[in-house]
């Protein structure tokens, strides 16, 4: 299914498939965290979210290294959210009510409940449903979800079902296989041409 147009601080994401968000924990050793971001980008991540102590310095590095990448800060801490936005984050993946900070910086906003807050950017608000266990109607906002068993065969099957059901963004630590199933689901739905056509005799 085609992803609705999303705009995070002027960076527009539009795709003929579900988008893939790489979840990266900020590790104590900065080189390891940077390697995780590089690997996610190389594997085809459309967005990267960074969580953990020191996220703002990793956001700053990622913004300099990948100027066109959509970068999210995954946090419940208002001061971390603000610092990450100042460092160049485009999206707040909020674990608490951080809508005011997103509005102040014009950043995109993903949260489990979307407030009616003035100043949140149009086209930049996403409902984060957490781990998606069953496919159900999603409502008015584009949906961000991860799937149970991320990276396992069962998890990849759930990711394909989620993409087919209209999940806009799939959060994962296994970017390459999840991107492949999102592409496959879009090809089956007819929003994306197949990568390779095989005629069965």
Image (cartoon, helix red, strand yellow):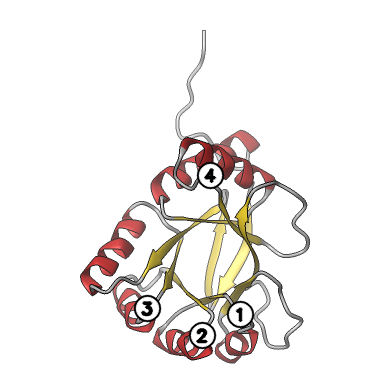
Of 49 and 17, the residue lying toward us = 49
Q: Are circles 4 and 2 on residues that touch, CB within 8 Å?
A: no
Is residue 76 left or right of 162 when viewed as pictured?
A: left
Q: Which residue is mark 4?
A: 182
Q: Secondary structure at mark 4?
A: helix
At x 23%, y 72%, the residue is 29
At x 33%, y 74%, the residue is 62
Query: Which label's residue is closer to the chain start, 4 or 3?
Result: 3
Label annotation for residue 77: 2
Q: Are circles 2 and 1 on residues that touch, CB within 8 Å?
A: yes
Label annotation for residue 59: 3
Rendered image quadrant of residue 130: bottom right
Q: Which residue is mark 1?
A: 96
Which mark is nearer the camera, 1 or 3?
A: 1
Residue 81: % across, % down: 49, 85
Query: Which label's residue is closer to the chain start, 2 or 1?
Result: 2
Which mark is nearer the camera, 4 or 2?
A: 2
Which mark is nearer the camera, 4 or 1?
A: 1
Rendered image quadrant of residue 101: bottom right
Q: Is residue 169 above or below residue 187?
A: below
Q: Are circles 1 and 3 on residues that touch, CB within 8 Å?
A: no
At x 59%, y 84%, the residue is 102
Which mark is nearer the camera, 2 or 3?
A: 2
Residue 82: % across, % down: 49, 89
């Amino acid at each position: 299914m085609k992803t609705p147009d999303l705009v995070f601080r002027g960076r527009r994401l539009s795709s003929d498939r579900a988008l893939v968000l790489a979840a990266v924990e900020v590790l104590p050793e900065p080189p390891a965290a940077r390697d995780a971001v590089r690997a996610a980008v190389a594997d085809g991540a459309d967005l990267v979210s960074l969580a953990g102590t020191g996220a703002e310095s990793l956001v700053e590095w990622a913004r300099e290294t990948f100027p066109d990448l959509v970068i999210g800060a995954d946090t419940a801490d208002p001061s971390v959210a603000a610092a990450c936005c100042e460092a160049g984050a485009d999206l707040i993946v909020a674990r608490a009510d951080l809508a005011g900070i997103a509005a102040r910086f014009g950043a995109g906003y993903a949260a489990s409940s979307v407030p009616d807050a003035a100043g949140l950017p149009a086209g930049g608000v996403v409902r984060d449903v957490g781990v998606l266990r069953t496919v159900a109607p999603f409502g008015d906002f584009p949906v961000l979800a991860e799937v149970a068993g991320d990276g396992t065969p069962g998890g990849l099957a759930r990711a394909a079902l989620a993409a087919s059901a209209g999940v806009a963004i799939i959060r994962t630590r296994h970017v390459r296989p999840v991107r492949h199933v999102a592409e496959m689901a879009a090809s089956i739905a007819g929003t994306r041409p197949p990568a390779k056509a095989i005629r069965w005799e």
